[in-house]
Structures are given as structure tokens and as C-alpha cells.
Image (cartoon, coloured by chain):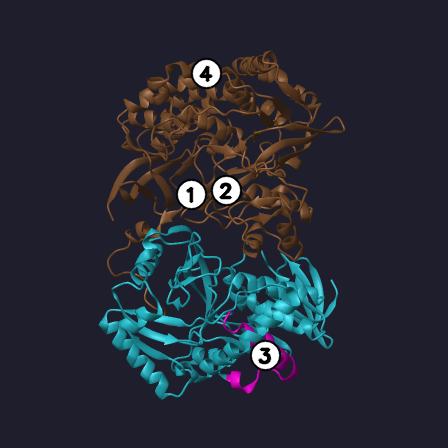
Amino acid sequence: MGAFDVAVVGGGIVGAAFAWAWARRGLSVVIVDAGPGEFSATRGTFGNITVQGKGFGMPAYACWTERSSQLWPELAGVLREETGVDIGFHRPGFLHCCVGDDALEARRALVERVQAEDSPAGSDLTMLDAVEARALVPGLGPAVSGGSYCPRDAQCNPLRLWRALRAGYLARGGVLLPGRRVTGVRPEGDGYRIDTDGGVLDAGRVLIAAGLGMPPLAAQLGIPLPLYPLRGEILATAKLAPMLTVALNGVRQTEEGTVLIGQSSEKAGYDEGTNLPVTAGEAANAVTLLPALAGARLVRAWGSLRVMTPDKLPVYAEANEHRGVFAVTCHSGVTLCAAHALDLADRLLDDGVPSELYPFTATRFHVSEAA
Amino acid sequence: MAETAHDLVIVGAGPAGLSAAVAAAGYGLDVLLIDEQQAPGGQIWRGVERVAAERPGDLDLFGADYAAGRELVRRFRASGASYMPGATVWQITPDRRLAVTDAAGTRLVAAQEILLASGAYERPVPIPGWTLPGVLTAGAAQVLVKQAGALPDGQIVLAGNGPLLLLVASQLLAAGVPVSALLETAPTGRVWSALPLLPKAVLRSRPYLEKGLGMLAAIRRAGVARFHGVTALEAVPGDDGRLGAVRFAHHGRTEELKADLLLLHEGVIPNVQLSMAAGCAHRWDPDQLCWRPVFDDWGATDRPGIAVAGDGAWIGGARLAETSGHIAVLGALARLGRIDEAERDRRARPLRRAALRDTAIRPLLDALYRPPAWALAPMRDDVVICRCEDVTAGAVRVAVREGCHDAPQVKAFTRCGMGPCQGRMCAPTLCRLIAAERGVELAAVPPPPPRFPVKPVRLGDIAALSGQGDGPGAPDWM
């Protein structure tokens, strides 16, 4: 099926971000995507681009998130310029609402601890009391006691982001092989030979970015990946008149008017369905934050599997025995998309995993297994 | 969470559901029938009690089949089965609880056995101009007449294919509503390909055939202009933005007829949203050109305790639906241990004979009234196929060219099917467009699975199912 500079296994938001960047650089790139029937975390993204809350107690993660947040306006601009797709990037801020005084005090203590660490996760983060919160977000319910607010937190339309990355990639001559499963990657000459269920292809380098589907393939190449699925449910209402600009924890209104609801975390194996008590809990949470939502009509709810690591941090790894074979996965592919596409993609190919991302290599899983 | 348990919960009060409820109550089951309408009858017998009480003369208007529904409805009312009208089932949990919302609120209903008898709906017919005011489905016009006694006026054109199209035409004529033209989209010569199926159908299905011939005769007597083998059908807007005319190709010429009301119909397909969302296996039916649940001899799906009956399982018409509802109840009785398999089979024997009789006509009807491909997926890129989200055929084609191979991914890229109807109206068209663009079989492109709730529900109603304080907290990975 041909020879390429780089092969990317997985065409979700993570894989597409790298593939697009490499195609823009003039490399010949192929995406092999298993497609239908595979677990797609991309279809379950909420569209938040948040710094707040990312990397509390883990400054390296906070710094990396911050880097991406800074690059996001550029990403949105370049995608619009190259594809004509407006991915709906805007920066209205994020208010983490607390319900009850105890929750507010706990949040305050957490924020103070983070700020004492001097981590980007704490910068621009302010505590609001109930009155201040209501001034920021009219319509908050009486149970909301306040919260923490970060004005730099942003949003986008994640499905349009996905589409723009893929369209931009194709426009730059990238090759997409949908509905193909990669069964093996082995060294061949100066590069690698990739076996798929629809033929063989050759590539100088390989990026494995196939989410929950990647552990067996990564293991073949000596990259241990103890990933597990963590199900989240998202609820979508019918389109409503504009009522919410700021994102709340588990509630945001899209530019089309849909209110998206969802912040659940559930260990449900590989089941992508929904669980009525969880759906009901999500609805109750949303109505507590914004009582006006009680009358909104829910048009669909769906489950999606986050790609989770034991320490909940992303993975940026290169195979020890197979230089030029990389594995990347994370549960915040939207937030980190700008850093992937506009920063890491180039450096990964030129120098391997950069030093500031050493905390996220797969060697940490060797250590935890030995312990 | 208020919760009550039943031996059998039936969804849908058409021929299949009513017949199942009557049978189940007769066998002593604790049975509950849940239905969206305010009165029993389903689509075919919609409002039959009210029409009989308030407009008895109209019973004849809708024909003997409609009047026959009165008898089953009467038996249902007398059966002792519990009945929840005006209620929507929007979710079925894996442990067989149904989330139901009606005027009184939302509750969970537990069932040992569930029978989905959700009937059929008309295929979308996305010709250019199909979204103009003044363009309806033939079935929708029939509902207006049955429910409200509201008779349309102006220049009426019926176009399409299938028994219901003829039925609606003859019902309108019987009600004194003039029909200006009947445009038949079945390719001419179709009757020859259906001929080999005729003898079996004649032997077993004389009443059906006589009914069909009777309708045709009435249409002929009324002097309705008929056009056979119509293609390139198009609804043309008038100056007021409403339907103004109907344009079509006929014998190589383009014809245009003035029209105030265009009624489209290309047959019906099973309403599978609940069975699909519940996770039951479905397959492409190449004869009926639709996706339908996979079920065994007793209507049981591959999901334990969930069975299907009637047109929601396989398009067979009202009489077969009645029989299949009863057969499904026998299957449930055996699974519940109320009767043994020998008893089940013995009771099913006469029912199976009746079913065979009512099934015999189907291959003929399916072949005779097979909708033409051009009526089910627009050639033109500017035709809207998803009315909820305003997605055109062209947008779908572009998404496929961008590498979307399956319907869920096209949905993600274009929003096609993301609206309140959850693809009920656009999924058949969407899948056809994808299959054509990729050059693969229709069976290779299943529709995006509908999500719960299958019908929109107020958030407050769902929140009410939540126990105090078990809402999700902030996840620890954020």
C-alpha cells in the first residue's frame, strides 16, 4: 500500500493533530484508522479547553496544559485559514461551582494549595462567593455557594475541530485509510513495516495514537501501557436561546444553542452505553446549578470511554528498542491539541520526547509494576 | 423512584400490542400496555372509538379494516389489562426497567418480559422541495382526517408507491375531496417482475387482492389523472414560498401540475428506535429495504426478555400484526414458566396457519411496490436530508469523501441525525447516500444507533429519577 515518512495509527483528535502537523511540514503521512465499531474517545469530548484543575499537585502537567492553552488561538486561526472551518474557539472562562459551604471551603483550600506551589494551574484562579458567582453567571441556583473561576479557560466545538484537522490533513496530501486495523509493526530496513488487515505499508516512523486500542500493539514494541476505560456520559439538550457563556463544571452551552451536560466518571468496562442513575444524576447536577434547565428537553445521552492511565496523566513515549516508534495518548485530547499540533509534533520527530515531558514516558509504568 | 413490577409490559397499542394485551390478560398475566396516543388503536385504527361515537358515518369512509379495529379495541378495554395512554417510553435499562413519562410525571416500570409493538412509519421521501409547506406524507394527511375530521382542499396531488397511497386516495375520494392526480413512481413493467409471485398470493390472499382492485376501480371511476412510471419528481415552490406545482418526468417529457397539497408515500418501515437503542441485534432486509430487529419464531430478540411483534418487527400489515402479538405472548408465557413448550406450540398452531395466510401477499407487495432508489436519496446536492439540523445531501457526500466510512462518523462530522428526532427521519437517506458514495451494499452501512432518551424528555423529569445527593461530583482526574 506504499511507503510513507510517517504512519499514524488512529485517526481521532490526537492522531489527526500530529498527522496534520507532519503533513503541513511536507512529509508523506498515512493515517490508519480502525474506524467503525471501535471505541472513539473523540466522539465523547465535551469541548472544554481548561487550565483550571489540570495538574493540581503535578506542575509538569499544569505547565504542559498551559503551553497548549497559549497555543490555542493560533491553532484555531491556522485551521480556519487552511480549511475554512470555524471550530468555535472562544475564551469565556470556566466557573467551577460549589454546592454547599463545605464544598466551597474545600475548593478554597485546594486553590490556595495550588497557588502556593506556584503552578500555572493556580494562576488567574480566583475564588468567588455566591454573590460574585451569580453576578458572573445569572441564573445560578440558590444551592450554589460560590466557586473558583479562571478567565483563561476556553471552549471549542470538538467535532468541528476533528473535522478541520482531518480536512486540513487531506488538503495537504495526507492519506487516510479508514476501516483498517493494524495488526503489527516490525522493523524493516531503516524504518518499519506495518501489517494491516487490508495490506502492508512501510513508514520511516510510526505514531501509535489509537487510545484504548493501542496497548497490545504498543506492548509488541516494548511500550507498557496499562490503560483502562473510564466511562463518561454526555447529555445534549435541544437548542436553547443563549443562556450561558461561561462554562460550568459539567455544563456548557454550545454556539448552536445546545446545552451539553456531563462530568461523570464510571468504571463500566468497555460498555459504551448509558446508565440511567448516572444520567439522572447528571441531569440533577445541571438543574441544581441552573434551575432554568429543568424545562429544557434532553434529546440524547451517550456514553464514551475516556482513555485513562493509573496516574491519570498523559503518555508521551518512544520505544526503547525501536527508535522512531512513538505512543501518545491522553484523556484531554482537545485541551492538548494545540500543543500536539503546533509544538510537540515537530520536536518529537527531530529529537524524540522532549525533556519537559519525561514525567509522561511509559517507563513510569515499569516502575509501578515493579513496586 | 416509584416502581411497580409486571409480568409483561407492552409498548404500543396498535393491532400487535392490543392483541398481545388481550391474549396475555386472558392467560392471567399481569400485563401493562403503554402507548403514546390518548386512545387505543395505533396508526391504523387511530381514534376508532371516537370516530365510532361521534362520526359513525365516517367509519365506512375509512373502510372495513378500520371498522374492524373497534372489535379488538373493545376486547382490550374488557380484558383487565392495565393501560397507560399518553405515555412515552424513552429508555429501557439492561435489567428491563422502562423509563416512562406521561402527564403525571416520570417513573420506572419494571418488567419480566417486554414486548415492543411500536409499529411502522412512512419512509422519508427526500425529493427536491419535500420540505416546502404544502408537502406532507400521505399517512400524515390520513391522520388529520381520522383524528380531526379535517379535510384538505385545493389541488391535491398524490405521488409515490404502495398500498397506503391508493388507500388514502380512495379515502379522500370517498370523503368527497377531489384528487387531481395520482403519480405512480413504480417503474412501468414492474408488474411483470411481480407476476411469478402472483399464484401463491392469489391462492392465499384473495381478500387483500380484492381490496386493492376495489381501490383502483374507485380511483378510475373518479376520473383522477394517473401517471405511471413517473421519475425526477420535484416539489416546486409558488410565489408565496409554499408548494405551487409538482414537476416530474413522464414518458421522456417533463410535466408540471399546479398543486396546493402534495402527498408523498413510498411505503412504511419498522420503527426500530427503541429496539435499536435497547441494544437488540438488527439486520438489513433486502426485500423490504429497511433495517429490522432479528427475532426468533416467538418474536424474541437476542436481548433476554425483549420481544418484538407487528410492523415494528417486519412489515406484514394489521392482520399479521395481531397474530404475531399473540404468538409473542405464547413465547413469553413459556419463558416465564407459565406453560411448557408443548403447550406453547400447540396453542401457536392455528395462529401460525393464520400468519402464513397473511404473509403470503407480502412478497408480491414488496416486489410490486419496491420504492425506486431516486425517491429515497436525492441526486441533487442541495436537497436537505436532515430537517432537524438542516444538513444537505451534498454535505454528507463531502464528509464521505473526507474519509467518513460509517454513519456515526458522518453524523459526528455533519450533525446529520443529531436533532430531536435522532435520525428517525434522515437515517435511511443518510445510509443510502453513504453506501452510494462508497460503492458498497446498503447492508454494509447500518444507521447510527439511536441514543436514550429515544424521545425528548424534560431534564427536570430525568433529574427526578435521581436519588438525593447522588449526582456526580467533580471527577478526580480533572
Q: Which mark is residue B196?
A: none
- Which residue corresponds to mark 2? B424
User: Is residue B369 at least partly visible in the picture?
Assistant: yes
Q: In which quarter of the image is residue A113?
A: bottom left
Q: Is mark 2 on a helix, strand or loop?
A: loop
Please tell me in which quadrant of the rendered image residue A328 appears: bottom right
Q: Residue at x 57, y 70 (%)?
A: A76
Q: Which of marks 1 and 3 is in front?
A: 3
Residue B303: numbered disc? 1
In the picture, measured across the screen, residue A190 lies left or right of residue B345, that is: right
Residue at 67 percent across and 43 percent down: it is: B380
For marks 1 and 2, give the CA distance.
22 Å
Q: Type of residue at label 2?
A: Arg
Q: Label 4 belongs to which residue?
A: B61
Residue type pointed to by label 1: Arg
- The residue at the far right in this view is B252
Q: The cyan chain is which one?
A: A
The residue carrying mark 3 is A344
What range of the chain is rendered magenta? Answer: A334-358
Query: Who comes first in sequence, dot 1 or dot 4?
Result: 4
Give me the residue at 59% from left, 24% from top: B365
Q: How far apart are marks 4 and 2 (CA)?
A: 31 Å
Chain designation of label 3: A
